[in-house]
Image: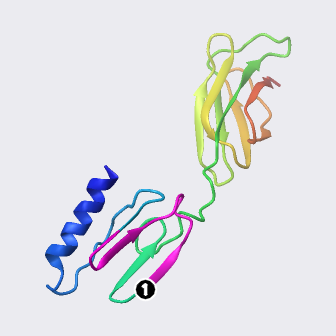
Amino acid sequence: MRKIFIIAVFLLGCAIAGRGQFVITKQAVAPGGQSSGGPFAVSSTVGESSCGSSNGGAFSTNNGYNGGGSCAAAHAAPTAAQITISGRAVTRDGSGIKNVVVTLTDGVGTNRSVRTNAFGYFEFTAVPSAGSYVVEATGRKYSFAPMVVQGRDDLTGLVLTAQ
């Protein structure tokens, strides 16, 4: 596949050579590859380790992710892993309470809610593992104190006890 790409670039260059300026706006070169022939040379490094521009003769290249020499993606922070926050809403004697609405709110005010099952269990999945969360619960006959939790790792066994 890489040889076909290199041959295609070479043939394209030969066909266009002498017909004015041209630009390849977006193209990926296989990691660790190199090709040269005629007036063109194409090379890359494993992992695309360089960012920025290089100029030589009549040609210039922009290295980095996203084309255009933009290295923003190469230096971007990693995406937060996702965790699960789960637990149970119970009475003072430890019995599960069904149909309690449990709400999880992040630091910027985004919230989502789930309802406990027949045994009082609830679960939030795909929660970003960054920052603090407020867990609140409301039931028809019960009230619960809000709770602040840290979203670093999976949090299971959270107990919301009715007041």
Q: Position of residue 16 (x, y in %)?
A: 16, 77
Q: Left or right of 141: which side holds 148? A: right
Query: Vertical placement of 151 versus 33: above or below?
Result: above
Eyeballing the image, is 61 above or below 159? below
The residue segment tinted magenta is 36-55
Magenta segment: does it hold 70? no
Among the 4 quarters of the image, the one containing residue 155: top right
Q: What kind of residue is marked 1?
A: Asn
Image coordinates for residue 94, horizontal then vertical, percent? 82, 12
Tell me if residue 138 comes above or below residue 64 in the rendering: above
Q: Residue furthest bottom?
A: 57
Name the foreground residue: 53 vs 13.
13
Quarter of the image with the C terminus in it = top right
User: Position of 28 compared to 123: left or right?
Assistant: left
Q: Which residue is mark 1?
A: 55
Q: Nearer the viewer, residue 28 or 117?
A: 28
Q: What residue do we see at 43% from left, 76% from top? A: 62
Q: Residue furthest front?
A: 37
Q: Position of residue 82 (x, y in %)?
A: 63, 39
Residue 47 highlighted magenta (yes or no): yes
Height in image: 134 above or below 97?
Answer: below
* Mark 1 residue element: strand
Question: Dot 1: few (<14), some (14–19), or many (≥20) neighbours within 10 Å?
Answer: few
- The structure's colour scheme is rainbow
Residue displayed at 35% across by 73% down: 41
On the rendered structure, is 154 left or right of 28?
right
Residue 26 point in image, percent of width and height = 33, 67
Which residue is rendered at x = 63% and y = 51% of the image? 109
